[in-house]
Image: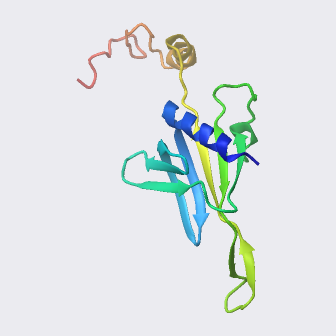
């Protein structure tokens, strides 16, 4: 578990960095899945906006019985293993909403506890230097017989730089 103070610090960091987060959650039968950015973090509320700006939502952080868990992308189910000191490791915050009582089944009078949740999972930005990008692309360029210095030629050596213009 993570303290509310640590959660607010993490959310403010993600807001400052302009990080993209994947939001996945389920609430009272509603399901949510979208990519968003944190638009604002106040004392007791976090505001998120979808990347296309077409949807906004907020989450109150002062609800009774709310708790949080923190993880890195290497700890998230299904992610590739990464070193914990990797600066590109995405941060994950699980928000567990207050327990509510729901019927145990169709027509059943018995109530059982249920806790809905929301996952905010940072998508790390990939920042490559030009040298790294060139090193990555060079084998493919050589395979396609394209010189990286801007000169373009076909398999027979003819100039194709004017193709499609």
Write the residue at 50% across / 47% down: 35
Q: Looking at the image, which is closer to me, 7 or 140?
A: 7
Write the residue at 59% across / 59% down: 25
Q: Looking at the image, which is closer to me, 112 or 138?
A: 112
Q: What's the image's color scheme?
A: rainbow
Q: Looking at the image, which is closer to me, 86 or 94?
A: 94
Residue 38 placement (x, y as % from top left): 49, 43
When the figure is inspected, residue 8 is found, relative to residue 126, above or below; the finding is below
Write the residue at 31% across / 15% down: 161
Taking the image as shown, residue 55 lies to the left or right of residue 84, namely left
Residue 50 placement (x, y as % from top left): 43, 49
When the figure is inspected, residue 112 is found, relative to residue 86, above or below; the finding is below
Residue 91 placement (x, y as % from top left): 65, 38
Q: Quadrant of residue 136?
A: top right
Taking the image as shown, residue 91 lies to the left or right of residue 43, namely right
When the figure is inspected, residue 37 is found, relative to residue 115, above or below; the finding is above
Taking the image as shown, residue 7 lies to the left or right of residue 21, namely right
Taking the image as shown, residue 80 lies to the left or right of residue 156, namely right
Q: Quadrant of the C terminus?
A: top left
Give the residue furthest to the top. 149
Residue 100 placement (x, y as % from top left): 67, 73
Q: Looking at the image, which is closer to me, 47 or 5?
A: 5
Give the residue furthest to the left. 165
């Amino acid at each position: 578990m993570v303290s509310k103070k640590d959660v607010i610090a993490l959310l403010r960091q993600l807001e400052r960095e302009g990080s993209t987060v994947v939001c996945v959650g389920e609430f009272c039968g509603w399901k949510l899945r979208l990519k968003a950015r944190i638009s604002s973090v106040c004392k007791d509320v976090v505001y998120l906006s979808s990347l296309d700006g077409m949807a906004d939502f907020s989450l109150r952080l002062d609800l009774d019985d709310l708790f949080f868990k923190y993880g890195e992308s290497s700890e998230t189910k299904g992610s590739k293993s990464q070193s914990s000191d990797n600066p590109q490791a995405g941060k994950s915050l699980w928000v567990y909403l207050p327990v509510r009582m729901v019927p145990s089944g169709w027509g059943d009078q018995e109530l059982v506890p249920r806790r809905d949740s929301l996952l905010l999972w940072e998508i790390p930005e990939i920042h490559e230097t030009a040298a790294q990008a060139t090193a990555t692309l060079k084998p493919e360029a050589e395979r396609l017989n394209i010189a990286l210095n801007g000169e373009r030629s076909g398999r027979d050596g003819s100039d194709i730089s004017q193709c499609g213009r």
